[in-house]
Image: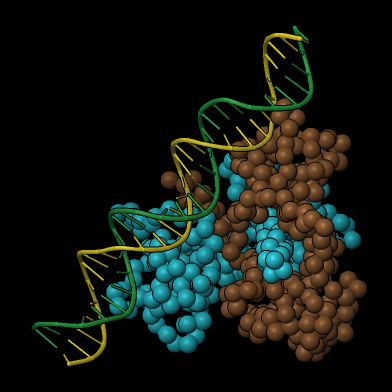
Chain colours: A cyan, B brown, C green, D yellow
Amino acid sequence: MEMIAEKQVKALSERTLRRLPRYIEILKRLKNEKIEFVSSNVIAEELGLDSIQVRKDLAATGVIGKPKLGFAIDELISGIKHTLNWDNQTDAFLVGAGSLGSAILGYKTFSDHGLNIIAAFENEPSKVGEIINNITILPIEKLADMAFRMKVHIGVITVPIDQAQSVADMMIEGGIRAIWNFAPTHLKVPDFVIVENAQLSHSLGVLTHKLAESLKGEYK
Amino acid sequence: MEMIAEKQVKALSERTLRRLPRYIEILKRLKNEKIEFVSSNVIAEELGLDSIQVRKDLAATGVIGKPKLGFAIDELISGIKHTLNWDNQTDAFLVGAGSLGSAILGYKTFSDHGLNIIAAFENEPSKVGEIINNITILPIEKLADMAFRMKVHIGVITVPIDQAQSVADMMIEGGIRAIWNFAPTHLKVPDFVIVENAQLSHSLGVLTHKLAESLKGEYK
DNA sequence: GTTGTATCGATATATTTATATCGATAAATA
DNA sequence: TATTTATCGATATAAATATATCGATACAAC
């Protein structure tokens, strides 16, 4: 039996990775409008980007466009989803059933984004046993063992800052390999563990700074 | 009376802006440990960055370090906060009191980050009148007029995708100049309006892609 | 068919961002 | 008081990212 070679795809920069979901947004909308092909130019205009950049990003997914027509929308959506690994669902555990954690548990759309949260954990005994979006909150002591047995690879951290590192440690002990970290602290993890930080304050800082600059300019 | 010249500060890149809040994290911790000075090297090691980059980022805040000692922590914290405009609170409105919106209303720490959410709005009549974290949910019809009268500059959008653009339009009509957008859609706004996107899916895509790459490498 | 044209994708250039080098300085030490 | 040393901050280099140029191609119009 011959090995099927994985389609040769150029390395993806982090910037490109962050733009890919935005392309999906637009593509889904166009698909709803029964449009079948779209040019890099149209996508770029919709998102305020440069069309060359769009073409380069799309090239990284391995999808090929057609001169004069552009890209087949269906093919592009599945190509991007494949690149992000959103065509598979990866099981995940969430720790910290506070308001943000509950909100995340409530989102049904993460399954479209490759994430399948199958259990949630809490330190706080009063919250254990609660049910949020069909998921029962379990005591944190069970985390590592269950993660290991169920071969869970993704952990979502939505606990307060002072518990975040110890939760990360437990996750890693349980074999978790990628952490989506909402706690406002830097996690120290071994090299083989991927951490993606999703602190709201980082994004808020950009906003408040730019607004201040913009208002300052106005009164000059 | 002579004008006091604003301390000359180099332009801040978006990357730098996103790192500044991380420095604050570390600095607060060190301050708690009664440490008074810190070198760029220590900060860099804590965050897994390069010390030169830390120095460059800090230079952009205008804070000056001392040879052999490093940076005065108190001065650095206030310098960074000033750069982010986190030493002032800007009033904000939030629209969309779903689970994410409620979680955001519940955070008390945003006041440390320059954001003061003073009112929240909803489309859904059943939610109007609800009180979350001392904030009463108001009907969306009041948004533009109140924003205008109260001179509110920041709007937070946590509504579903199909309402996001119209909410943005109302905000802009009410004079709002900066939008923190959690809805998974690109907002079309005039040039003078700042949009900071905080879609969870962007960050999730990076995670799922990297995890897939990492697991793939393992079985080669 | 032949010609015209929109669009791709490859290669080249420019810009931005990160990293390296090194002299200057202020504290610590001898 | 002289010497050593950690650290800064300025300048220089390297790497990553974005933008421009242009020939090739496949559809559309003639």
Vertical comparison of B14 with B153: above or below: above
Percent position (x, y) of residue A12? 46, 55
Quarter holding the C terminus of chain A is: bottom right
Left or right of A105 on screen, residue A77:
left
| A31 left or right, relative to A99 | left
- Report x, y in % for residue B161: 63, 79
Q: Is residue B51 left or right of residue B37?
A: left
* Residue A79 lies in quadrant: bottom left
| Residue reaching furthest to the front | B1
Could you tell me which residue is drawn at 52 percent across and 55 percent down?
A: A14
Give the image location of residue A154, x and y in percent.
63, 55
Q: Is residue B130 visible?
A: yes
Q: Residue at x 75, y 30 (%)?
A: B69
Question: Would residue B113 be visible to someone looking at this image?
Answer: no
Quadrant where the N terminus of chain A sits is: bottom left
Residue drawn at point x = 68 percent, y = 50 percent: B8
Q: Quadrant of residue A35?
A: bottom left
* Near-viewer residue (A118 or B94): B94
| Front residue of this view, candidates A112 and B21 | B21
Q: Residue at x 38, y 80 (%)?
A: A37
Q: What is the count of numbered marks?
A: 0
Q: Is residue A218 above or below residue A17?
A: below
Percent of width and height locating residue A145: 71, 48
Of residues A145 and A6, the one nearer the viewer is A6
